[in-house]
């Protein structure tokens, strides 16, 4: 891992709360409302924040430290690389704040998700310090949120709306900082 925020879930949570403020929980609440009582597979689940809102929850993450932390807390999480590995079937597949890590393969990831679930919910930030006009802030933010050293790009709100419309989202929610795309078969 290149970034210090991915060294431990507690560090991650603190940084996310600082960056997002009150908006930190807003997307999770909206996702839980949309998912209702479905079985959830949370891809790139990180600190498993969504598990606090969902009864039937499973997660997949690439970071061994996050996976071990989740298992210690009794959360069903496995290690996986969703770009290379098969995604298991689930009623509802969710991804929050991680789609940018797959640019330029983000459409491939979404299509892969759509093949494996009745419902797919993607929440992605369209407002980033990593896109700040202040170059020092932008560089620092990119480094803090960079897992492998390769992810310099971020989505704008307009790009997310366009992407979700292109892939035929049933519903798009602007939750302030994040744009949530809801796809159903």
Image (tube, rainbow, N blue to C red):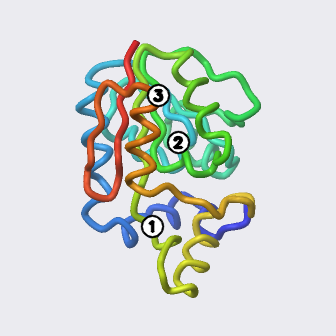
Towards the viewer: 85 or 132:
132
Q: N-terminal of the two: label 1 or label 3?
A: 1
Dot 3 falls on a residue whose secondary structure is loop
Q: Which mark is residue 45?
A: 2
- Quadrant of the rendered image containing residue 89: top right
| Residue underneath mark 1 | 128
Q: Position of residue 65 (x, y in %)?
A: 66, 52
Of badges 1 and 2, nearer the viewer stands 1
Q: Relative to residue 85, is residue 9 depicted above or below?
A: below
- Would residue 35 be found to the left or right of residue 80 on screen? left
Q: Which mark is residue 90?
A: none
At 64% from the left edge and 72% from the top edge, which residue is drawn? 143
Q: Position of residue 178 (x, y in %)?
A: 35, 52
Of badges 3 and 2, nearer the viewer stands 3
Q: Residues within 10 Å of mark 1 (few under 14, many from 20)?
A: some
- Would residue 15 be found to the left or right of residue 109 on screen? left
Q: Relative to residue 161, is residue 9 depicted above or below?
A: below
Q: Which mark is residue 167?
A: 3
Q: Position of residue 153 (x, y in %)?
A: 60, 60
Q: Position of residue 166 (x, y in %)?
A: 45, 31
Towards the viewer: 85 or 151:
151
Dot 1 falls on a residue whose secondary structure is loop
Q: Residues within 10 Å of mark 2 (few under 14, many from 20)?
A: many
């Amino acid at each position: 891992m290149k970034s210090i925020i991915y060294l431990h879930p507690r560090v991650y949570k603190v940084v996310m709360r600082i960056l997002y403020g009150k908006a930190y929980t807003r997307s999770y609440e909206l996702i839980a409302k949309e998912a209702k009582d479905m079985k959830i597979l949370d891809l790139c689940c990180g600190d498993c924040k969504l598990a606090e809102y969902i009864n039937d929850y499973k997660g997949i993450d690439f970071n061994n430290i996050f996976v071990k932390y989740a298992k210690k807390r009794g959360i069903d999480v496995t290690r996986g690389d969703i770009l290379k590995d098969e995604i298991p079937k689930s009623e509802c597949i969710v991804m929050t704040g991680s789609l940018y890590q797959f640019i330029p393969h983000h459409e491939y990831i979404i299509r892969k998700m759509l093949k494996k679930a009745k419902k797919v919910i993607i929440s992605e930030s369209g407002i980033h310090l990593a896109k700040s006009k202040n170059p020092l802030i932008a560089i620092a933010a990119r480094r803090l949120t960079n897992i492998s050293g390769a992810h310099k790009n971020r989505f704008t709100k307009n790009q997310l709306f366009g992407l979700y419309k292109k892939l035929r989202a049933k519903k798009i929610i602007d939750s302030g900082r994040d744009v949530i795309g809801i796809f159903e078969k």
